[in-house]
Amino acid sequence: MRRQRLIPIIAAALAMQIGGAGADEMKYPNWKGAWARWVPPSAVLDPGNSVLTAGGQPSHDQTKPWGRGQETPLTPEYHEVFEESLADQANGGQGNFFDHAVRCMLGGMPLITTFGPLELIVTPETTYIASGAGEPLRRIFTDGRDWPADLDPPPTYEGYSIGRWIDEDGDGSFGVLEVETRGPFKGPRVYDATGLPLHFDNQSIFKERIFRDNTA
């Protein structure tokens, strides 16, 4: 069975407003079924349906090689952490990579929705993302709520997500889900198997645009 493609992009969210019809009159997308990450022509899928680059490992930005090829803007402190991870791996260690398959830990954000197959359950109030890789169920609240002034939830792997639907082409149907996810997160967490680090305080903020790839 051919897998459908959905593109989750961690990027700066656009400041757009829904015009015209109210949200209750809009048509929500039909994203039923199994979804896999978009694969660029230069990449392949491993048996676990993870996107592989020429380096042989999944990368966060699938259009670039993993590790240094991600061109992630790191501070000097975290650049040193990253390079120490690469050096340790070159000597046979695991570096800064806390692989849940090796150390019995979950990947958490952003790995939870970027590598493995997914199922999406869309409702007007909440969109649920169920990972096929054993990660926890993710909830994206789309009921119009704002961030609580006293948001201080217990640390989780998936964080706390608020999203809103966008009708970009003005056809009366939603096609893009913009999401912001905040911590605290359970850590440590990394972007990929090279140990490309996220902040040690586990207070990351992720912004995503999730939409269907109609070219696959």
Image (tube, grey):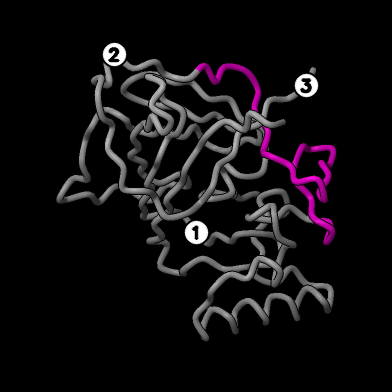
Kindly identify the residue that appears in the image at 55 percent across and 59 percent down: 189
Q: Is residue 96 above or below residue 176?
A: below
Hey, which quadrant is residue 90 in on the image?
bottom right
SS label for mark 1: loop
Mark 2: few, some, or many residues within 10 Å (few <14, many ≥20)? few
SS label for mark 2: helix
Instruction: Please tell me whether mark 1 or mark 2 is closer to you in this view.
Output: 2
Kindly identify the residue that appears in the image at 42 percent across and 27 percent down: 127
| Residue 146, percent from left and from top | 20, 41
| Residue 156, percent from left and from top | 42, 47
Residue 216 shown left or right of residue 22 in the figure: right
| Residue 123, percent from left and from top | 38, 18
Mark 3: few, some, or many residues within 10 Å (few <14, many ≥20)? few
SS label for mark 3: loop
Q: Which residue is mark 3?
A: 2
Residue type beneath disc 1: Gly
Kindly identify the residue that appears in the image at 51 percent across and 51 percent down: 10
Q: Which residue is mark 2?
A: 25
- Judging depth in this view, the residue of 185 and 28 nearest the camera is 28
* Residue segment shown in magenta: 30-56
Q: Earlier in the sequence, mark 3 or mark 2?
A: 3
Residue type beneath disc 3: Arg
Q: CA distance from mark 1 to mark 3?
A: 35 Å
Magenta stretch: includes residue 48: yes
Q: Which residue is mark 1?
A: 187
Residue type beneath disc 2: Glu
